[in-house]
Image (cartoon, rainbow, N blue to C red):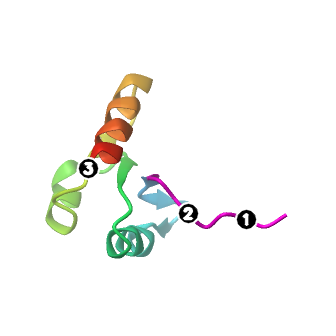
Amino acid sequence: MESNPDIDAAILDIDLGGAMVYPVADTLLARNIPFFFTSGYEDDALSQQYPEVKNCPKPYPFLEIERALTGALSG
């Protein structure tokens, strides 16, 4: 079975066991693929490097994730 490389949107956790997700975020930005972060990091830390990207701080309720994803997909 062939996989489909198309991505509609992404949800990125900033720190995955010590590996930072910034290279993935940069690739998504370069490819114009909408995404948002889920993180325990403060918004100030992200707002400097990724001012246009929403951060859903942990712990996050499902409705917050739903709103962020809807916003990312709507441009």
For the residues labelled 2 and 3, say whether their Cβ atoms are less than 8 Å apart: no
Q: Is residue 47 magenta?
A: no
Quadrant where the image shows the N terminus: bottom right
Q: Position of residue 68 (x, y in %)?
A: 32, 38
Q: Disc 3 designates what residue?
A: 75
The residue under the point 32% across, 31% down is 67
Label 2 amino acid?
Asp
First-in-chain label (1 vs 3): 1
Q: Which residues are magenta?
A: 1-11
Is the magenta region chiefly helix, strand or loop? Answer: loop
Q: Which secondary structure, mark 3?
A: loop
Find residue 53 and name its label. none
Q: Disc 1 designates what residue?
A: 3
The residue under the point 35% across, 74% down is 26
Q: Disc 2 designates what residue?
A: 6
Q: Position of residue 43 (x, y in %)?
A: 20, 49
